[in-house]
Image (cartoon, grey):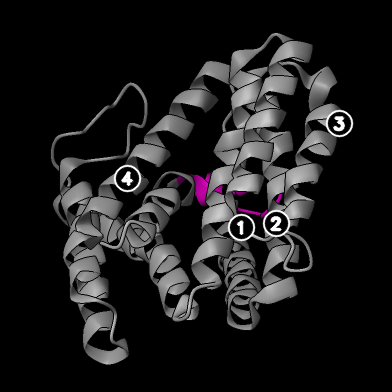
């Protein structure tokens, strides 16, 4: 095992342990970790979309809806959703950069979705399902891609992503959903739609890869040694978690 792989494995295990622990406790612990992640993600987003001189402003503005998300304040609600939109409008007016301003929703919605899922009656299971779908997708895609290779999906954006990897990721998500249904009573319909979230996670991966190519950088940041930035690790969560929360909110 190379030193780089060892470093990558250690940082990945530490990050996963912290995330799962915060998810288990929920409440203030999860909100605190999610808030810290959101502030870092916003800084990385500004770096990818230009306007570095507005990084502090974007982070400070985002702190308002993030504070409202606290269990001691409004919590996940329409009020907080509206405040994220208000931050977007503020940033758009001040920076005149639509991409930069959109970060308020790109960062805010998945954070609010995670906290909303965790606040439900069976919130630990639902939040774990939403997050672990992305992990299962990554694992399934990695092994299928390495085993079968084959045609690339979009080589100009992400040269390592193959159709075999996508289908492997969908299979991984489906197996995870079924496992949680059998052993943890996850609703059957959520297990059935789990492959959809594998596709959404891949969309998030491609979108961030496109942003990085547009910005001329390899990684969104340097938060996790061997892994890159927070957006690099959470690109699939950003696109899949809000949809998962919407499905459950809608009563699917």
Q: Within the magenta stretch, is there residue 147?
A: no
- Residue receiving disc 4: 200
- Image side of residue 52 versus residue 158, left or right: right
Residue 76, disc: 1
Crowd rating for badge 4 (residues with CA inside 10 Å; few <14, some 14–19, many 20+): many
Q: Note whether residue 231 is visible.
A: no
- Residue receiving disc 2: 69
- N-terminal label among 2 and 1: 2
Question: Most extreme residue toward the bottom, as rendered?
Answer: 183
Quadrant where the image shows the C terminus:
bottom left
Residue 56, disc: 3
Residue drawn at (38%, 70%) of the image? 129
Crowd rating for badge 1 (residues with CA inside 10 Å; few <14, some 14–19, many 20+): many
- N-terminal label among 4 and 2: 2
- N-terminal label among 4 and 3: 3
- Which element carries disc 1, helix, strand or loop? loop
Q: Position of residue 123 (x, y in %)?
A: 48, 76
Q: Note whether residue 23 is visible.
A: yes
Do residues under tags 2 and 1 come within 8 Å of each other at their CB atoms?
yes
* Residue 91, picture quadrant: top right
- Image side of residue 215 versus residue 124, left or right: right
Q: Position of residue 171 (x, y in %)?
A: 17, 62
- N-terminal label among 3 and 1: 3
Q: Within the magenta stretch, is there residue 227?
A: yes
- Image side of residue 236 versus residue 198, left or right: right
- Which element carries disc 4, helix, strand or loop? helix
Choose mark 3 or mark 1, whichever is in front. 1
- Which element carries disc 3, helix, strand or loop? helix
Q: What's drawn in magenta, residue-wise?
A: 223-235
Do residues under tags 2 and 3 come within 8 Å of each other at their CB atoms?
no
């Amino acid at each position: 095992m190379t030193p780089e792989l060892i470093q990558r494995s250690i940082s990945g295990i530490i990050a996963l342990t912290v995330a799962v622990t915060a998810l288990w406790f929920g409440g203030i612990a999860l909100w605190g970790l999610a808030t810290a992640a959101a502030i870092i993600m916003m800084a990385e987003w500004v770096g990818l979309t230009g306007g570095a001189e507005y990084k502090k402003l974007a982070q400070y503005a985002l702190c308002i809806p993030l504070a409202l998300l606290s269990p001691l304040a409004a919590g996940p609600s329409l009020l907080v959703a509206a405040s994220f939109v208000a931050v977007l409008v503020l940033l758009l007016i001040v920076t005149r950069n639509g991409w930069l301003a959109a970060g308020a929703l790109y960062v805010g919605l998945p954070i609010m979705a995670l906290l909303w899922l965790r606040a439900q009656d069976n919130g630990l299971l639902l939040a774990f399902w939403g997050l672990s779908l992305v992990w299962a997708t990554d694992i399934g895609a990695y092994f299928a891609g390495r085993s079968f290779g084959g045609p690339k999906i979009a080589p100009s954006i992400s040269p390592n992503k193959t159709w075999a990897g996508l289908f492997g990721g969908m299979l991984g998500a489906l197996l995870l959903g079924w496992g949680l249904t059998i052993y943890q009573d996850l609703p059957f319909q959520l297990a059935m739609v789990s492959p959809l979230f594998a596709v959404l996670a891949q969309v998030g991966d491609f979108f961030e890869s496109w942003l990085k190519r547009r910005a001329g950088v390899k990684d969104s940041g340097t938060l996790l040694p061997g892994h890159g930035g927070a957006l690099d690790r959470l690109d699939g969560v950003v696109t899949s978690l809000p949809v998962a929360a919407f499905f459950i909110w809608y009563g699917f």
